[in-house]
């Protein structure tokens, strides 16, 4: 096999693309299930301060990680012509140079970070482990690029699944044994080394160093604009967490991270696979506005159909679960933030398919302007509210930012017709009515785990009945379609 990625025919591309979509959707669902249960166990075994330290240090490293890639890997994937050895080695050389420079900077400013965030020595070791993992991740970039260009997603997902299993198995076991923050340090290093070894076994290439001015210039034409959008996303999320760490402390970040993890879990379960699949679909039906309108409305509907009842049920049942689950009462202070961040996730269920539509149809400038708006509002509002009201203020800030997603909906409505009533309002009404009945019914049940299970069964049943009354027989076929997709 050539180092530069096989040149394949159109028929092979079609077959591999269809297979890749199915594999990526399945991978996302599998990894989110593993993550879901592992995070639950970690919230039992670890204290909020310990979990908050991991969220905080990870956010700091993720912010630095942005500067380890100036979009060259994405440019290699996007490049129409066959890749050359010179381009691969130039990209590899630039990336390793950037990463090594970042590691030196992180080591140099460690005393400053330790003082600003009041980090323990174990937290510093975690910081260094995450910094070193940047190098391990960068070494994997070229094999990953080649696999993506060849559309060999069935091979690309192997190291990702192994990394996830090793990371969560290690961190959960060590947390259970009482190693605290050091659990993350060991897990991060094992994840990085295992992924690096496996991907080079799957897709080796002739490592070498080179630097070509012409190759760098050509790749940066696409890489820099792409990376600019990525930077806004990183700056809005991880950069903000890094700032909040100095305002509400590691315990506050622990509470905020706990609320975010659970409130965003339905998005990772249901929304991510749908948007990954619909992106190429939207791209290929740009010429047919009527079909594109139906497809966008349908994708919003399916995401809302699945995420809305999950979020409503989570808000209602979380207080009961905190009282029932042993060692879980420590998360009581995060319940208020959970409600408001769930509201943010509710709006994300609508806004994300819309920005996905903008990108797929070549309207990336609209997405860029929306990202500027959300980043500006987040950085102006959330830190101020956090300073005044702590974790609860941060939750309120995220809810207000989520509400501004209505701007994306208004803009999209001017570009293409969206069935907002059928796609959003009906699932929302059904979810809220379900929540009302579940809340009333839960008050008559004893505080026990089986009562929560009964409440979930009751909620699902009521939700389907209400949807049937609002939508009709069509909802039955829709649910059957969803079950078939998950079965596959």
Image (cartoon, rainbow, N blue to C red):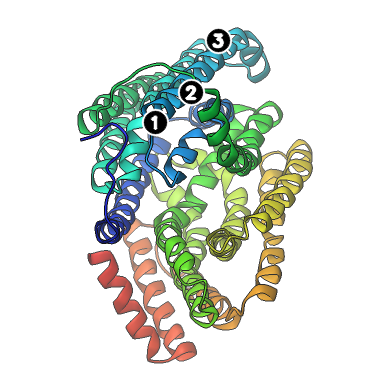
Q: Is residue 20 left or right of residue 325?
A: left
- Separation of marks 3 and 2 at Cα, in angstroms: 14 Å
Q: Residue at x 50, y 33 (%)?
A: 72
Tell me whether the residue at label 3 lies in contact with that at label 1, contact meaning CB atoms closer than 8 angstroms: no
Residue 140 location in percent, x, y? 35, 28
Question: What residue sits right under mark 3 in the picture?
Answer: 104
CB-based contact (under 8 Å), mark 3 and mark 2: no
Element at label 3: helix
Q: Position of residue 399 (x, y in %)?
A: 67, 55
Query: Depth check: 434 or 310 in front?
Result: 310
- Tell me the distance, in whole angstroms, between the alpha carbons under discs 3 and 1: 21 Å
Q: Residue 320: in sight, yes or no?
A: no
Q: Earlier in the sequence, mark 3 or mark 2?
A: 2
Which mark's residue is nearer the viewer, 3 or 2? 2
Which residue matches tag 2? 95
Q: Relative to 40, is 251 above or below?
A: above
In what quadrant of the picture does the C terminus appear? bottom left
Q: Residues within 10 Å of mark 2 (few under 14, many from 20)?
A: many
Q: Are marks 2 and 1 in contact (CB under 8 Å)?
A: yes
For marks 3 and 1, give the one nearer the viewer.
1
Q: Residues within 10 Å of mark 3 (few under 14, many from 20)?
A: few
Name the residue: 35% across, 27% down: 175
Q: What x and y, as percent, mark residue 99?
A: 50, 19
Relative to 345, residue 415 above or below: below
Q: Earlier in the sequence, mark 2 or mark 1?
A: 2
Instruction: Say the numbered circle drawn on residue 141.
Output: 1
């Amino acid at each position: 096999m050539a180092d530069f990625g096989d040149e394949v025919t159109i028929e092979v591309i079609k077959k591999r693309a269809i297979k890749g979509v199915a594999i990526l959707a399945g991978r996302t669902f599998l990894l989110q299930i593993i993550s879901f249960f592992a995070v639950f166990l970690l919230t039992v075994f670890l204290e909020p301060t310990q979990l908050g330290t991991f969220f905080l240090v990870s956010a700091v490293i993720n912010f630095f990680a942005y500067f380890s890639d100036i979009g060259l890997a994405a440019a290699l994937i996007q490049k129409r012509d066959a890749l050359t050895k010179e381009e691969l080695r130039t990209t590899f050389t630039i990336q390793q140079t950037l990463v090594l420079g970042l590691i030196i900077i992180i080591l140099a400013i460690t005393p400053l970070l330790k003082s600003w965030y009041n980090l323990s020595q174990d937290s510093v070791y975690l910081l260094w482990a995450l910094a070193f993992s940047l190098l391990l991740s960068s070494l994997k970039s070229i094999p990953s690029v080649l696999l993506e260009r060849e559309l060999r997603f069935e091979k690309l997902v192997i190291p990702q699944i192994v990394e996830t299993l090793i990371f969560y198995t290690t961190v959960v076991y060590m947390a259970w044994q009482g190693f605290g923050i050091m659990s993350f340090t060991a897990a991060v290093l094992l994840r990085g080394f295992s992924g690096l070894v496996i991907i080079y076994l799957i897709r080796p290439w002739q490592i070498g160093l080179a630097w070509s001015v012409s190759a760098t210039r050509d790749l940066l034409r696409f890489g820099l604009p792409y990376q600019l959008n990525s930077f806004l996303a990183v700056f809005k999320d991880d950069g903000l967490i890094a700032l909040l760490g100095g305002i509400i402390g590691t315990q506050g970040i622990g509470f905020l991270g706990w609320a975010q993890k659970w409130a965003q879990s339905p998005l990772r379960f249901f929304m991510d696979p749908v948007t990954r699949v619909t992106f190429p679909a939207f791209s290929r039906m740009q010429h047919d506005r009527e079909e594109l309108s139906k497809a966008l409305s349908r994708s919003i509907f399916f995401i809302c159909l699945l995420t809305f009842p999950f979020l409503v049920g989570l808000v209602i049942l979380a207080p009961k679960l905190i009282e029932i689950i042993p060692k879980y009462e420590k998360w009581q202070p995060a319940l208020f933030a959970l409600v408001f961040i769930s509201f943010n996730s509710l709006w994300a269920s609508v806004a994300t398919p819309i920005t996905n539509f903008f990108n797929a149809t070549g309207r990336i400038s609209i997405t860029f302007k929306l990202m500027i708006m959300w980043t500006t509002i987040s950085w102006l509002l959330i830190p101020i509210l956090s300073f005044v009201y702590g974790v609860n203020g941060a939750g309120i800030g995220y809810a207000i930012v989520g509400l501004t997603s209505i701007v994306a909906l208004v803009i999209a409505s001017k570009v293409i017709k969206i069935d907002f009533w059928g796609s959003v309002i009906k699932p929302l009404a059904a979810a809220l009515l379900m929540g009302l009945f579940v809340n009333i019914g839960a008050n008559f049940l004893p505080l026990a785990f089986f009562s929560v299970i009964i409440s979930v069964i009751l909620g699902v049943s009521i939700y389907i009945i209400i949807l049937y009354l609002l939508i009709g027989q069509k909802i039955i076929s829709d649910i059957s379609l969803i079950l078939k997709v998950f079965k596959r």
